[in-house]
Image: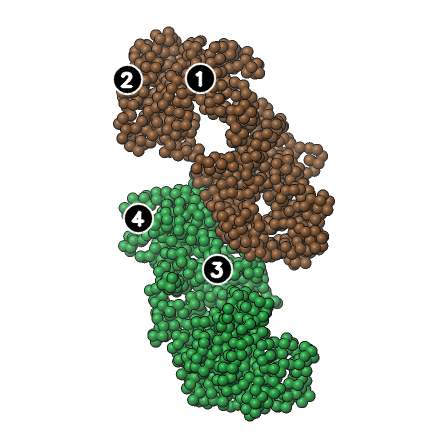
Chain colours: A green, B brown
Amino acid sequence: MSSKWVYSFGEGRAEGRAEMKNLLGGKGANLAEMSNLGLPVPPGFTITTEVCTWFYANGRSYPADLRAQVDAALAAVEAVVGMRFGDARNPLLVSVRSGARASMPGMMDTVLNLGLTDATVQGLADRSGDARFAYDSYRRFIQMYGNVVLGVEHHHFEEVLEEVKRERDYTFDTELKAEDWQAVIAGYKAVVDRTLGRPFPQDPVEQLWGAIGAVFGSWMNQRAITYRKLHDIPADWGTAVNVQAMVFGNMGDDCATGVAFTRNPSTGENRFYGEYLINAQGEDVVAGIRTPQHLTIAGKEANGSTLPSMEESMPEVFRQLDAVRLKLERHYRDMQDIEFTVQQSKLYMLQTRTGKRTAAAALKIAVDMAREGLIDERTAVLRIEPKSLDQLLHPTLDPKAKKQIIAKGPAGLAGAASGKVVFTAEEAERLSELGESVILCRVETSPEDIHGMHAARGILTTRGGMTSHAAVVARGMGRACVAGAGELRIDYKRGTMLVRGVEVKAGDILTIDGSTGEVMLGEVPTIQPELSGDFALLMGWADRFRRMKVRTNAETPLDARTARKFGAEGIGLSRTEHMFFDADRIVAVRGMILADTEAGRRAALARIEPMQRQDFVELFKIMTGLPVTIRLLDPPLHEFLPASEAEMEEVAASTGTDLQKVQQRAHQLHEANPMLGHRGCRLGISYPEIYEMQARAIFEAAVVVFQETGETVTPEIMIPLVGTRKELDILKAVIDRVATEVSQRSNRPLDYLVGTMIELPRAALRAAEIARTAEFFSFGTNDLTQTTFGISRDDAASFLPDYQRTGIFEQDPFVTLDTDGVGELVQIAAERGRGARPGIKLGICGEHGGDPSSIYFCEKVGLDYVSCSPYRVPIARLAAAQAAILGEKAASEA
Amino acid sequence: MSSKWVYSFGEGRAEGRAEMKNLLGGKGANLAEMSNLGLPVPPGFTITTEVCTWFYANGRSYPADLRAQVDAALAAVEAVVGMRFGDARNPLLVSVRSGARASMPGMMDTVLNLGLTDATVQGLADRSGDARFAYDSYRRFIQMYGNVVLGVEHHHFEEVLEEVKRERDYTFDTELKAEDWQAVIAGYKAVVDRTLGRPFPQDPVEQLWGAIGAVFGSWMNQRAITYRKLHDIPADWGTAVNVQAMVFGNMGDDCATGVAFTRNPSTGENRFYGEYLINAQGEDVVAGIRTPQHLTIAGKEANGSTLPSMEESMPEVFRQLDAVRLKLERHYRDMQDIEFTVQQSKLYMLQTRTGKRTAAAALKIAVDMAREGLIDERTAVLRIEPKSLDQLLHPTLDPKAKKQIIAKGPAGLAGAASGKVVFTAEEAERLSELGESVILCRVETSPEDIHGMHAARGILTTRGGMTSHAAVVARGMGRACVAGAGELRIDYKRGTMLVRGVEVKAGDILTIDGSTGEVMLGEVPTIQPELSGDFALLMGWADRFRRMKVRTNAETPLDARTARKFGAEGIGLSRTEHMFFDADRIVAVRGMILADTEAGRRAALARIEPMQRQDFVELFKIMTGLPVTIRLLDPPLHEFLPASEAEMEEVAASTGTDLQKVQQRAHQLHEANPMLGHRGCRLGISYPEIYEMQARAIFEAAVVVFQETGETVTPEIMIPLVGTRKELDILKAVIDRVATEVSQRSNRPLDYLVGTMIELPRAALRAAEIARTAEFFSFGTNDLTQTTFGISRDDAASFLPDYQRTGIFEQDPFVTLDTDGVGELVQIAAERGRGARPGIKLGICGEHGGDPSSIYFCEKVGLDYVSCSPYRVPIARLAAAQAAILGEKAASEA
């Protein structure tokens, strides 16, 4: 069987296309595409990724017919450029570059100026009229080829160069003249000869095959293997090899090289944006040795530069480049990142690819392009990475400000903030009431710290991570947070924090940046987010395409209002226990927990009930017309237990018991594994009076809201941690009884649903049975992940790093839903639940409800809504829209 | 549609059969069966359970054609006995009794002597020639009918009787003469009249329908509802009603009544065994007012009774009864529990049913009947309740001994023991080495107490329950155990135990009985179990029919030897961490846990390795020729952490670190939910050197055993807590590497398997993937139950009682496998595992591996073996055999 292994491009046509990335790699496919567009691409050819696969499947050898195809392709290049490979008078030089399906910058090898030999270097000198240029090019080639292909270590070459410079008393490379470079070349060749025991190859064809082999070989070097592992790129994709005629931007002052974006990648403004250098090579622009000049007059002026722009210095070439820009945008329908070279006033395009951009730019570009008619609104919606919205919603550090970084936590949380250091939630509240900005610094946070976290601008913990209590709560509140800056040592007693000899005291100013995880001394200026009209426009399009509703997890009025502002369509999870930590209630709550009789519990509950009712009244008013899901008391009781003797005394006093009894009971309630202990609906089964009180507070609040506003509220009451239908039956009976009582007493009919969290594997498996009682399911994927994996989120920090290092977890399963395991349970539950109760309402309220790739999964399973922290609501709206659009596409393609 | 609602029986034939229990209830079906056998059954008829269902489905009314069928059946009875219902001179009297599919003793209502009226009582007096008997019967009827059918409270009747006795200055009922009973009857009738406003019914047909209605009505009384709930009897089964001609055992000295077993129900001996009373009613035998006499001369002599046996006093009737006994046994092919009445020298059979028996009797009866050819060996195997073997394997209390009970724990553990009270494992070991019997008393036990538990005769804890550490370990060791005698308060400091004012000191003698949960002061004599030849014979049959292998969970040589003696076919779970608690190793183990560098861990591991190797050498030698599954280190690390400062100092000294560092590290290792923490294979991923050491110890032990005995050992190395295939891949690579090293160094080929526990829901779901690496699966159903339900076994005690009370859990899911939830995961894993690796070895090693109903499930899923504690091995062998036999039956019937 004979295959096509080589694809030619250049001179206004090509055998490949942009869609052939899998075969030609990204670079090769785009070089072909640009050729087809008639753009000035130096001619060349691509050896396909299939050759790479063949190479590794056959002991690093090549297909028999490859050589003939390469020879033919090379001959075609010679014909186009009118030069011959190895011709001493008019030599064709080529570059050899790798190019995989996905970009792997710097991971694999490149060889430039290939084809230069002792003979051809003369021809290059003659034809360019610049001997220094020719010899410099040759010595660069020997150095690059010697290192990359022949494996001679770099320092050998460096030593030769240094020796020549020392002999001649030069400081800079620029001082070397043509004859100096000749001396260096002689030294380089000697190095190769000495190291390898054979001379540097003088046959260009031998050079070419050496370089091709090196590129294929570099696919399996350690650097590339590691990169692929980190970026989840399969090894069997392989790389292509691109061989292309060299063009030179450093052949004189009519030469130049540059990089550009077709629009501004920071702001998204529709203006040509780029830099160039006269008489320079590509790497000079990037390396920052010379100051690059702006492409356009506008760019030059905006940056106060005095160096001439390309628009001024090379107006004709600039005009051609600007035309290329328009052509590329119209063709690719996206902002492009391009590389070009001007050789003796002729423009050559060397690369085009989709340009990276900031979140703000992505938004503007997507909306502008839709307005310009380049893309449709669906495509615009797909163009924004949902997670990047975090950048638009939170304050960010001024990128120009100076920073004195003293510690780092994990990157990836949103927001930046400055403020005075405080070490307790109480102090945070006190100072904030005085109008101060504070950063709350704790070893770790617990539900008791929530009021302080609310009061603070930012939260800093020394323990924890992306899914720790601090991170989760901060995300929900939109607070800046660095969770788990492990080098910091907090000493609560002394009121200080120590890191590498630096001591931070209470009252000192600190700045934290959640996105980078950095902790900085002093105040670093932040930039407040401004939500442009484009944002609202794009989110409006997203909402049109979205199938799933987006609700929020909220229990405070502030959170609920924030979420509504961000577009939440109801509350998917209101954790009633979060309402229990307020200073004015916690004593009553503790009294309830510690009571060892029903009468004692009822007494404490009676004190809590009016406050709880008021909570619901407020929530219902904020969410009028929208569904509100309220989860009855869930958490492990130990979260409420008094820890200190002072707290125990307070409880003893308020309940009229003696301290010893309180201590005893607290000890009795201690659990070995509270996560799997007496919590969730198990509390409701043991102490029905608790759920009874909560149900009454909910129904009475609904009545109050109706009386005050005339609006009907439909609470969705959610029973947590159900594992059997019977639990739900028993507790639903309690709720129904209370509803009847309230309804009769108030003479109001009550509309409500009773449903359950699906957060235990058993509940997922028994969903058919449970759905006969449950009117809705909400997937509690936090706990479902904990039980399915048998991993405690609180304790995972001790081995998660090992699990990520060894590749066992590609993502933290508490951040991104494990679709294979946990996801199968969600799917089973959804199917069985629907089977038993067609149309049963299905949602998700775990942390995953705000994670885009988990949201895609929810769309696939067909959930009715996702629920997430207020600040994640826009992210979820966008992700849900993308999921719906991609789902439609997949369906129409199937 | 007309249905048959009524089935007649009596006079040597019947319309029903024993197989018609669902329709006729147990009592009705057996009355019919006895009639068909030609036994003397008083004639009667059964109104079917379908009438009960109809009754409740139709507002407590009857099918239209029922009355005609009852009339016809009643007429048939009249014809047989030659009496007429309501005939003043020769009245037919009947009993009306309920009879459901399952026996519900005392739960529903019975009416005797129905048909007596002011008119018919005369006829009864005349025909019996005993007026006192007739009036006594009539007043009993009014009282019973008045209470059961008419709802007149009991005390009203009591008051009348007391009044009559007071007037006449009588003390005992026996003093009342015929005319006195007439006065009582007048009073009773007045009570009914006064209470209901209408007279006591004098129409026998009205009486009959009243009684039928009352029996059906009693199916839904609270008592019956509760009983059904407790015994899992569906309400829609309904009850039948049996109407039967009365016979009287109290009509004179040629009358008698009795109960008997066709064989001895305590020993199983094939001898007629029963009691009777002359001139008495059935309830007199049961009530214990008069001393019952023995049926047989042999029985009388064996019990040193002086009262004449029935064999002597009524030789002819006895001969008939003995013939009935043989007929029933030959017919039912099982030991029967019968009731009979002799009326004027004529024998009547009133009931037969399968008799309850002790474990020893069950064994002997089954084996004897098989020998006698009454049943085949398969049936004999099915006749023994596997759990009852516990009674045969453990010492039991002498039932005649006096007991001073001071506290109670849950019943249901095996064994009884006496000994001196000790409060620490160390003291238990010390005294036992001096030859003393000890009872180890602890609040709860932990793995560190194991050596003391071994040394003790019995273990008593004040916390815990049937599946607590103490119970599980004691079961495995065959120790007597009372786990969770909650009223006891142990004061370790003072060395005392307090319960309701009684103080027990260290050194006092205590007796505990695991089967009842009783704790007794002083020594109560125990009876050592004797395993008869019958036991070995029956177990041999069981082994022939068994498909699944039975292995044991064992790590000590003692346990392994015990299990082999009980027939274990290998080790299914050897928990290597249990080997770590010995006094001479725990310091090294702690040193390893607390080391914060690999070098530190390796140093500690080097000290442990030779001991670990020796453990395996011993196990392998005991189990030569059998598979041995070794689970690598699994438990939450905190189990090993030093708790006291003294222990920390010891670790600090032995590892040359300072105390503060040890404390810090111990604090760092503390986990919120250790069950879901850094344990199982997560330890192997973080610290591969631990598993490396264990693998080396295993392989080197295999080499040593081969060198010493010439036997080849095939260890099955098991990785715990796997959730992803990758974990297994990484750790299998470590094990394979070590195997190669040991094999090369010792110049021996090594045979071994590497597999995994399936104990996380995710592992069950991903079984197909995992099976591509795992060579066997062992279902760790303890942890799988914990994670599937989200319940910590250590903490469940606080709500399990509520869950059992409310019927959420019918069984403790840690005792009996939850086939609906956990079982589905086991099934999924088995199917997917086999799909990926046909023939993959599948076993179970959780506590459920020794639970009969869980074993039936394992057979259904097709596991290859079950593994359980040594003392459960015989139970598992028997249960596995029964499961296989029932499986065959089901298959052949399908």
> Which label lies toward us, 1 or 2?
1
Q: Are marks 1 and 3 on the same chain?
A: no
User: Residue B169, position in %: x, y?
Assistant: 41, 10
Cα separation between marks 4 and 1:
63 Å
Residue assigned mark 4: A750
Residue assigned mark 1: B340
Please state the chain letter of the residue tagged with numbered disc 4 in the rendered image: A
Q: Say whether marks 1 and 2 touch (CB < 8 Å).
A: no
Q: Earlier in the sequence, mark 1 or mark 2?
A: 2
Q: Is residue B191 left or right of residue B498?
A: left
Q: Is residue B630 left or right of residue B38?
A: right
Residue drawn at the location 47% of the way across and 35% of the way down: B889
Please state the chain letter of the residue tagged with numbered disc 1 in the rendered image: B
Q: Nearer the viewer, residue B703 or A360?
A: B703
Q: Nearer the viewer, residue B566 or B786?
A: B566
Q: Residues within 10 Å of mark 1 (few under 14, many from 20)?
A: many
Residue assigned mark 3: A815
Q: Are marks 4 and 1 on the same chain?
A: no
Please state the chain letter of the residue tagged with numbered disc 2 in the rendered image: B
Q: Say whether marks 4 and 2 touch (CB < 8 Å).
A: no
Is B304 rendered above or below residue A132? above
> Which label lies toward us, 4 or 2?
2
Q: Amino acid at mark 4?
A: Leu
Dot 3 falls on a residue whose secondary structure is: loop
Q: Nearer the viewer, residue A859 or B186?
A: A859
Q: Is residue B833 visible?
A: yes
Residue B203 badge: 2
Q: Say whether marks 3 and 2 touch (CB < 8 Å).
A: no
Q: Amino acid at mark 1?
A: Phe
> Which label lies toward us, 4 or 1?
1
Q: Residues within 10 Å of mark 2 (few under 14, many from 20)?
A: some
Q: Amino acid at mark 2?
A: Asp
